[in-house]
Image (tube, grey):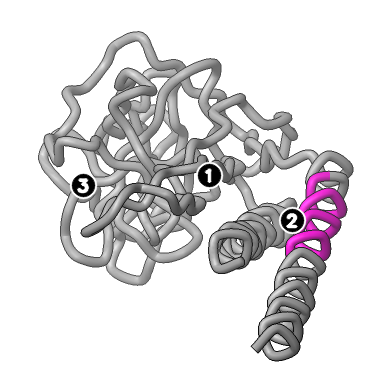
Amino acid sequence: MDSLLYIAMSGAKENQHAISVRANNLANVGTTGFKADFEQARAMQAFGAGLPTRVFSMTERPGHNFDAGPLVMTERDLDIAIKGDGWFAVQSVDGSEAYTRAGSLQINAFGMLETASGLPVIGEDGPIQLPLPLAKVEIGQDGTITVLPQGAPAEALFEAGRIKLVRPELAQVEKSLDGLFRRKDGAVEDESPDVVLINRALERSNVNAVAEMTHMISLQRQFEMQVKMMKNAQQIDQKQDSLLYIMG
């Protein structure tokens, strides 16, 4: 009965993991630019000193839903969304280059262009720093940032930087624990001229709340079934012990 117990135990473990993934998706249904995660597990034979008679569930590398979320117009100068495929580059906490579609930007007290979570936005020459104070900021479709210093005449607009836009192959990128995307090989993606920005707009999360709830209900039922299988294995084992005791 240890084979039955092992299968049910590992299955319940992976069901619990899948529920946590779906719960995280639901928690980010309102997060700008969030991409939903998939969970996946498959049966694997356990190899050891004897024959591979045991099977367990193994979590595979999770995938992600790269579909674009719905766009909402905000009329805010520092809000950007990406039309179609693509990402813009940011500097993560550890200093490495990463990619995101969460385009709610801001300017800090030192003139650094940042995401809403405080990550510097990367341009052609590293993090983008704008001159302060500013009367107007415009972000073009190609990521070009045009600014007007405070107190300057309207015709004094000038280019202060350009956001790095990239378009890597989706099979080459993965989501890190910080929610940002990076290339699987750790390389830095080259800038792409094909990425187009939409100014004064944001991309919402692509999480389908109804679908996630349906998946969670199904996974909870599977978890309950695995627990019942473990209880059945225990009962069968007890019956076998009783039978052996009587025969002995």
Q: What residue do we see at 20% from left, 50% from top?
A: 127
Residue found at the far top of this picture: 194
Q: Nearer the viewer, residue 127 or 63?
A: 63
- Find residue 11 and report its horizontal and vertical position in percent: 61, 57
Secondary element type, mark 2 = helix
Q: Please give the label number shown on residue 72.
A: none
Q: Please give the label number shown on residue 26.
A: 2
Picture quadrant of residue 28 = bottom right
Majority secondary structure in the magenta region: helix
Q: Are marks 2 and 3 in contact (CB under 8 Å)?
A: no
The residue carrying mark 3 is 97
Res. 152 visible in picture: no
Question: Which amino acid type is shown beneath numbered disc 3?
Answer: Glu
- Find residue 178 and report its horizontal and vertical position in percent: 39, 61
Magenta span of residues = 215-226
Q: What residue do we see at 21% from left, 47% from top?
A: 97
Q: Where 155 falls versus 125 (above or below)?
A: above
Q: What residue do we see at 35% from left, 33% from top?
A: 145
- Find residue 231 and report its horizontal and vertical position in percent: 77, 75
User: Dot 1: within a 10 Å radius of its alpha carbon, few (fewer than 14), some, or many (20 or more) residues?
Assistant: some
> Was residue 208 drawn as part of the magenta stretch in this picture?
no
- Mark nearer the viewer, 3 or 1: 1
Q: Where 241 falls versus 172 (above or below)?
A: below
The residue carrying mark 1 is 41
Q: Earlier in the sequence, mark 2 or mark 1?
A: 2
- Find residue 166 and report its horizontal and vertical position in percent: 30, 25
